[in-house]
Amino acid sequence: MTMFPMPMPEMPQEFVDLAASNPEGFAEAMGSGMEAMTAAVSDGASVADAFVAMGDAMGPMMEDMGISPEIFDAAGDAVGAAIGPAMHMAPADASPADMGAMMQDGLDMMLPEGVDCPAPIMDAMGDMGTAMGDAGMSCHDCGAEMMGDPGSDTYMLPTDGQGDPVVEPGQPETCPADACQSPPADGACAATDMMPPEGGYDHAPMGDDYTVPEPFVMATPDIPPVETAAADDGGIGALGDALGNDNPAADSPVATDGLTSGDAMDAAVGSALDGAMEQGGGAPTAPVADDAVDAPVTTDGDAAHDEVDPSAGMG
């Protein structure tokens, strides 16, 4: 049994659109990332290093789809901030199927209301959770690496007056009721043992000295020249770095309202074209599957499941 944080961060809009335009390609990239993650664990890598290996494998494939390292990084931060707390509050012995269900419900809760995730992507999210469990990566270790440190921008749970966490691993009842929310009643967790007990938890009260996280604010990212982006290994390993959180950056862009300026993508395309022309090449193109689906249309506003505005600090 587990809970998710409230509010939930939303996926960066550019990531949602580009992934939905080629869901099969995105699922293939995740599959390659999972293979790299599993191989790293088999070779004795830590959970953090396994996530880095996954990001390193996925990064170039994401760029081939037109997903810049900056947007990939933002998506990784958002996923870690949303799903990390759920794995933190889940039982330590959560099964691979339980971990897959949390990955799927977490992604569903991060999308704007009315937006459905393409089936290949949803299946890949479930497979990722299952792969983590099958590789021997514990639920709590994964949750700790996916979240930032207490008090950071990607730590979506309350802290006390000294900045220490107040939500105990595997004990969702220690999370104040206005700082967390249940999985969807008709979601993937409903088919596992992850749903709260009948009648809900007897949640701990919100202490007077508790600090709740600020809402995510995703600023328009600085898009480097195309040759810089291609050579930046930190960008290539963005998802692993974000999920592993070895070096969480204070300025790492993370989604708040799920919407970012189209100017950022215009700048990225312009930069890529300029770089290609200067090098005598043609404009880069991102492959799109023959059966690509239309990108989802999103709406402004809160995430579908952010039903409560618990405090001023959580906006």
Image: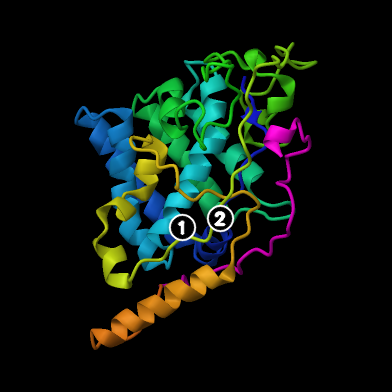
> Would residue 188 be visible to someone looking at this image?
yes
Asked whether the beta carbons under mark 1 and mark 2 sit within 8 Å of each other, the answer is yes
Question: Coloured how?
Answer: rainbow
| Start-end of magenta stretch | 287-315
> Would residue 291 be visible to someone looking at this image?
no
- Residue drawn at (50%, 70%) of the image: 265
Q: Which mark is residue 12?
A: 2
Q: Quadrant of residue 274?
A: bottom left
Residue 212 vs 7, above or below: the answer is above
Residue where numbered disc 1 is placed: 71
Nearer the N terminus, badge 1 or badge 2?
2
Q: Quadrant of residue 172?
A: top right
Q: Nearer the viewer, residue 72 or 40?
A: 72
Q: Quadrant of the C terminus?
A: top right
Per the model, the C-alpha gap separating discs 1 and 2 is 7 Å
Q: Nearer the viewer, residue 134 or 264?
A: 264
The kind of residue on which mark 2 rests is Pro
As drawn, is 66 to the left or to the right of 56?
right
- Residue drawn at (30%, 87%) of the image: 277
Q: Quadrant of residue 307?
A: top right
Residue 45 vs 248, above or below: the answer is above
